[in-house]
Amino acid sequence: MRLRLDGIFLPLVTPFLDDGALDLVSFEANLDSYAGEDLAGCLVLGSTGEAASLEGEEKLTLVRAARRRAGDRILLVGTGLESTGATISLTRRVADLGADAALVLTPHYYKSQMTLDVLRRHFEAVADASPIPVLLYSVPQFTGLPFPTALAASLAGHPKVVGMKESGGDVALLGRIAAAAPPPFAVLCGSAPVLYPALCVGAAGGVLAVACCAPRLVAALYRAFEKGDHPGARRLQGILTPLATAVSIHGIAGLKAAMDLGARRGGSVRAPLLPVAAALREELRPLLERAEAAV
Amino acid sequence: MRLRLDGIFLPLVTPFLDDGALDLVSFEANLDSYAGEDLAGCLVLGSTGEAASLEGEEKLTLVRAARRRAGDRILLVGTGLESTGATISLTRRVADLGADAALVLTPHYYKSQMTLDVLRRHFEAVADASPIPVLLYSVPQFTGLPFPTALAASLAGHPKVVGMKESGGDVALLGRIAAAAPPPFAVLCGSAPVLYPALCVGAAGGVLAVACCAPRLVAALYRAFEKGDHPGARRLQGILTPLATAVSIHGIAGLKAAMDLGARRGGSVRAPLLPVAAALREELRPLLERAEAAV
Amino acid sequence: MRLRLDGIFLPLVTPFLDDGALDLVSFEANLDSYAGEDLAGCLVLGSTGEAASLEGEEKLTLVRAARRRAGDRILLVGTGLESTGATISLTRRVADLGADAALVLTPHYYKSQMTLDVLRRHFEAVADASPIPVLLYSVPQFTGLPFPTALAASLAGHPKVVGMKESGGDVALLGRIAAAAPPPFAVLCGSAPVLYPALCVGAAGGVLAVACCAPRLVAALYRAFEKGDHPGARRLQGILTPLATAVSIHGIAGLKAAMDLGARRGGSVRAPLLPVAAALREELRPLLERAEAAV
Amino acid sequence: MRLRLDGIFLPLVTPFLDDGALDLVSFEANLDSYAGEDLAGCLVLGSTGEAASLEGEEKLTLVRAARRRAGDRILLVGTGLESTGATISLTRRVADLGADAALVLTPHYYKSQMTLDVLRRHFEAVADASPIPVLLYSVPQFTGLPFPTALAASLAGHPKVVGMKESGGDVALLGRIAAAAPPPFAVLCGSAPVLYPALCVGAAGGVLAVACCAPRLVAALYRAFEKGDHPGARRLQGILTPLATAVSIHGIAGLKAAMDLGARRGGSVRAPLLPVAAALREELRPLLERAEAAV
């Protein structure tokens, strides 16, 4: 049965203690806190999960915990590494632990060498070897590499490649890929300020950091769109955008601070990331309150 | 009475003869050919009009001709130059010739000096001195400068600043500006592949090069959106995007070739721009036919 | 007889009165003030001369004045415009007025269309039509376009193309061009913080804004290098770099302020450029004094 | 006793077998092949060593082997990772294994969060905890982040921070850092096409990929400069630049191909990197022969 990737996914944060150690209790508490929300699933080991700063064993621990707590929701796991072989190994490990699909980041360290051909071979090799479906992951603000439309269109023909997360906020690109790779290929929006227009041009849903602190607002926007309520979706986007913008200015530390302001446990970030200053944290409060009042 | 800037505007091309001379006859013939189309107005001396390659007298000749032929449609004229004083002079001249509003490009040669403060003062000085309403013009692919949201929001409070053309295809920026500067401030979309999502987040209309060769398709998309027909608008966007993309790969020469393939007169481009090769020109034909068949 | 382009050239500023009018008296006074300095010549209508903000008649006035005052020094004139035809016209006009060579900027507004072929044809057409020798002008910080090594190498074979000004501070590019286009083709360094290393890899000299306020320091560095005194050249570079950096942070306004602090007349900048704040102006003083003390 | 970092360092490649496994025999054979060359030392786990694609245990294996074979030459080891904690752990491990100094890459995944303050704290924490001296590593073509001059200047005051590798080819930056952080702080040039001008403005030496296939040419250039033979250094730079450019177009695969063409063992690259096509490989041969003939 084909995996359905419609709706809103949470890219889970990884809470740390003040000394930098993994805070698994808070990670699990967060998962429990989302149990009643209208969400399609969650993503572990994404950019928001500080995957770049996690050790191998920590990654597996988080996947196990997420699988235990996620119930029958979809569990996406970020497995993209610089080496094709290492990406395949990690993908197989998390498949064994119950991941439903792997989100595979573009390799990007050797930027000038990442030609269309190199990237295509990489994603094909991973998809060929993966026991579970694969999603492509475009996040040029972190990789420094734009994701070519032609690459997505070509890979969409691979039986294991079921979708893509587009996190650059490029609605034209997202629309082109959605047109070139029709459903069931699922393009997921990874940039909250364009969630509504992304849905308009064919996104199947979203994987949005801000949903970790305001899941109801994001879910409500998705449902408004789904039932054809465009004015409602646009109104909610108008509330979501300033919150998402304010949170993302401070990166993951901003999101964690916003979670701490609510009933959730953002916890510390891992160095070199810095926590958000107390004054800036307070600026998030009215935006969160407005988000809660909106739904 | 406030100028209404809803709907689709044509950024007119400037046809040239093979020797580079202005082809005013073709310019006027094109204007006449649009007379029966469902359009709000046109723009002379925009980027699509090769304004950067026009002499001062040529510019005035084109404005006079456009005013004569435009009837009661709105006539926008591009007047932005590097110097504030020169921009004001040109704005006053075209106002005398009957322009309804001036579209003012960001000065951009001395990029590192174009701070928020410098740009704000520039646009305020132009608006203060202008006898006609002013629209801001963001086109980072040509200027190399992003247009700061805060600048648009601040200038929207000026009584003479009635709107903005956003041509970078940045739907998040367009949405932020539309939210920060509500109607009657008009944000016009200048990037065809995002016309429909731009309208969804608050664009009042569009100023789209591709409309010079496919005015009916663009107008139909706008009308579909206006009456709430989202599936129809999205369908037409799906036809518009590949045409707009194919045309824009070759820049203005591509647009002129597409006009020549239809009943209009694109004419030559001015050097150093090069004409489109015959083989590439033929690739545009099926896309144009599909556009015509769609409406 | 072939034009010799060795040594230091001044890219003259254009002084304006407070109301923005051309201050020809100050322009001429500056020229006279450089009469006794060890310089090869000067450049009028360059980026430092605010050419982008000058009207056509103003440009000719400045060229006439410079020719009168420049004596037998070499007079370079910036003639590059977006249109090939307009560039040729201006080049012919300034040749008539006595310019020794034309400095031709890369056309750059329609960035994505400026292919190697387009640029080559542009420069060739200008060189073919020019009555005087032509220099290529690479200034990516303003044009947003890198200058391809292959383009310079190819154009260096044209009998009218005698050199290039490289203002991006890219010593590897400058060295590659100097290697690909040996003397008498002259590569002139346009970035003061790399003057000494540029000379080391084959630059024939420099066209440096900072030389307008510190001509002796720049000339001394050039002479030290020329006579093989590397430790001396490096020492002077160590004094030049912080001055050039401090001046250039504020763009042309910074250079004009530095000239006003000395015996010269920078005058006002033309809007939208802003004058340098008084406090920042004072920061330039000790750097200027150090430059004077060094030679 | 302070570590002396003058001269040429080899950033060793990591040879792989065709199946992607580590080829330790070839790694050691290469080290032996450099024993008689005029080199200051080598770098293991750098960008050229494909560190981004190596597993933890593989890294330690390579350090042990390099230490065994390096004799009394200086052994630099790349230890920079995204997390401060992980960087410290790896630095301590390689110190235990005999590394003489650690080369610490800028963390860069969360680009917008990498403020001056964040980077300063990261490098200070690593230097504080490191048992061995630390070198900063600027390589913007891979990290997507420029290295701020002010950061280098500030960190140069830390007793453990003994130098910097600047691999962006920015001679102005390198000169500014060399001026701001005088010897014994050592700025090492990481971009072969600017080795000679970098030495002119104060580089203490170089860490250059091309030296792995042409160690004598690079060493000869350094020695020519060191004894004040500027014409000789410039001549050798003219031979080095085309070789380095041709090799680097193909990235690490190009370097490995060039080594295979000589007496050394480049071996395979690890996927997703691709080997160099046979035809391109042949283009390197005459450049290598010219390099050998030059010294």
Image (cartoon, coloured by chain):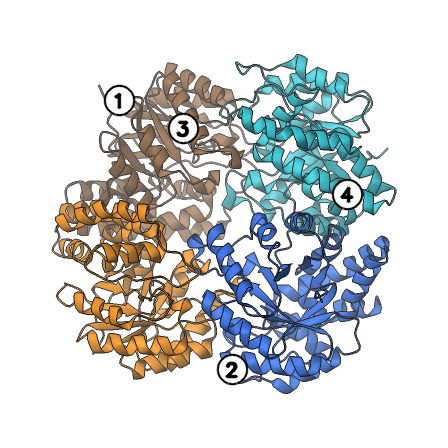
Chain colours: A orange, B brown, C cyan, D blue
Type of residue at label 3? Answer: Arg
Disc 1 and disc 2: Cα gap in Å? 76 Å
> Which residue is under mark 1?
B72
Residue at 34% over, 78% down: A60
Q: Are marks 1 and 3 in contact (CB under 8 Å)?
A: no
Point out the tag, 1 or 3, that comes first from the N-terminus: 1
Question: Quick one: label 1, few (<14), some, or many (20+) residues within 10 Å?
Answer: few
> Which residue is under mark 2?
D57
Residue B120: give its label: 3
Q: Nearer the viewer, mark 1 or mark 4?
A: 4
Q: How many marks?
A: 4
Q: Nearer the viewer, mark 3 or mark 4?
A: 4
- Give residue B107's position: percent from left, percent from top: 47, 31
Q: Nearer the viewer, mark 1 or mark 3?
A: 3
Q: Is residue B294 visible?
A: no
Residue at 70% over, 82% down: D69
Do pointers 2 and 3 mark residues of a single chain?
Answer: no
Type of residue at label 2? Answer: Glu
> Which residue is under mark 4?
C235
